Structures are given as structure tokens and as C-alpha cells.
Image (cartoon, rainbow, N blue to C red):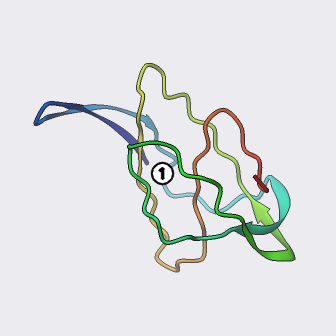
Amino acid sequence: MLLACLSLATNFVQVPILYDSGSVLFAPGGNQFGRISRNGVASDWSGQKPFPGVTGAPALRAYELITVNSGPYLYIQINFDDPAAALFVSAYTNAYAPVN
């Protein structure tokens, strides 16, 4: 489920849900070599993070691409539930490039 929130001073305004996939299974749409490395730096809304590099290459991994139109909202909140911790999530602006 994707949920966008706007911050106005100390007040929070809940806006409509932009995308809700419900309960679905992973449906690969492409392949890449390795996956994005975790660098231990949490994402926040202060700006973009530099690309941390790739780990696990040359192992082939599948990915699923989901495109969400955020409309007029500058920030979106992504809620992702994977009890098995088998999936890895990343967000990109404009285009997905699995190696940069």
C-alpha cells in the first residue's frame, strides 16, 4: 500500500491512497545481476541518497517494477509487508536503472 502524507507545521494531513496492490504474489518483470547493496543509511525526506552499489553480482535476480503516479504530491510513504523478509524494495524517481 502506498500512502502519501503532507506535513503542515506540526499538523499532519492524510491524503488519498495512490496505489494499493492488496495481497499479491511476486510477479517478475525483468532480470538484473546482483541487487542494490544496503548501506545502513535510513531513507528520509531530506533529499536523495547516493547509489550504494550492487552486491551479489553476477548472480541473476528477478525484479518487479511497479509504477505509481504521485500526482501533485512531492513525497509518498511506502508500506511494504514481507513476513519472510525475502524481498528487497527500492524507490526511484522517473526511471528504474538496476545498476546505478
- Residue 49, position as x, y percentages in the image: 54, 51
Q: Mark 1 points at which residue?
A: 22
On the rendered structure, is 7 left or right of 28? left
Q: Camera-side residue: 4 or 81?
A: 4
Query: Residue shown at 86%/77% (left/top)?
Result: 59
Decide if residue 14 is on the left or right side of residue 97: left
For residue 75, above or below residue 98: above
Q: Where is residue 18 in the image (x, y as percent from the top left)?
A: 44, 33
Could you tell me which residue is drawn at 52 percent across and 80 percent down?
84
State the image quarter where residue 26 is shown.
Answer: bottom right
In the depicted structure, whether residue 22 falls above or below residue 8: below
Q: In this view, does 57 lie to the left or right of 45?
A: right
Residue at horizontal 48 percent and vertical 51 percent from the top:
22
Q: In the visual, does 31 lie left or right of 86?
A: right
Where is residue 36? Give x, y as percent: 68, 65
At 46% from the left and 59% from the top, the residue drawn is: 80
Residue placed most toward the observer, 23 or 13: 13
